[in-house]
Image (cartoon, rainbow, N blue to C red):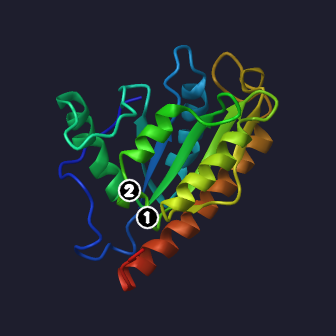
Amino acid sequence: MNSSTRENPRHTQDGPAPDATAPLKLVVILSSNREGRFGPVIADWFLEHAELHRDFQVSVVDLGEEDLPTALTSNPPPSVAEYLGRTSPRLAAADAFVVITPEYNHSFPASIKSLIDWHFTEWRAKPVAFVSYGGLSGGLRAVEQLRLVFAELHAVAIRDTVSFHHAQDRFDGDGRPKDPAGSDAAAVSLLDQLAWWGHTLRDAKAARPYTG
């Protein structure tokens, strides 16, 4: 999966009001960077639904493409500065996010926490939805902990999730769900909720900039 780029770094809450009729800019974040990860299978399936939804203009940030360090520095090395120069403006311009995450040791991957921690205003007053996968718990423990993290950053976590328990057993060799009815309906419901919150928050910020 390739991440598209945008030009100007770092977001401010100032600037022209967004076009209320424009599609919401949705950034789908693929959290896992583990070798042999199953995440791209989940992501490809979910992106088919997201790209068909009339409310969204979709792009992807794949944390398996680059190694973003956990050490937060004011003068990051050139490779990190270059990555942030490409990625941070995309997060800033986004109206909504979907985090696709596995569960590692009852929690979320360090890679998504690193991306979160390198940013702050980019998340504020924006909705975040979750698609999780894993073993018995389907990644839901990772999601519940990410809700706390995003709440601290003034983001709004969407109530409904999409979760795949024993995920590798639920997809066929072509990356399609073996029993698609439930998962497809869950994806549509999640995207509809995310669109409602995305439009509502974008319109509210246009009327009164968020100052949290």
Q: Nearer the viewer, residue 178 or 122?
A: 122
In the rendered image, the quadrant that contains the N terminus is top left
The answer to whether the residues at label 2 and label 1 have Cβ atoms under 8 Å apart is yes
Q: Is residue 59 shown to the viewer in this render? A: no
SS category of the residue bearing label 2? loop
Instruction: Determine the residue positioned at 62% across, 54% down.
Output: 147
Q: Compute the Cα span from label 2 to label 1.
A: 7 Å
Residue 126 x/y as whole percent: 47, 64
The relative height of residue 142 versus residue 154 in the rendered view (above or below) is above
The quadrant in which residue 20 appears is: bottom left
Residue 105 badge: none
Q: Nearer the viewer, residue 34 or 72?
A: 72
The relative height of residue 142 versus residue 39 in the rendered view (above or below) is below
Instruction: Determine the residue positioned at 57% across, 69% down.
Output: 196
Residue 59 x/y as whole percent: 40, 44
Whether residue 51 sits left or right of residue 138 in the image: it is left
Residue 136 x/y as whole percent: 82, 30
Residue 120 badge: 2
Residue 139 x/y as whole percent: 70, 36
Q: Residues within 10 Å of mark 1 (few under 14, many from 20)?
A: some
Residue type at tag 2: Phe
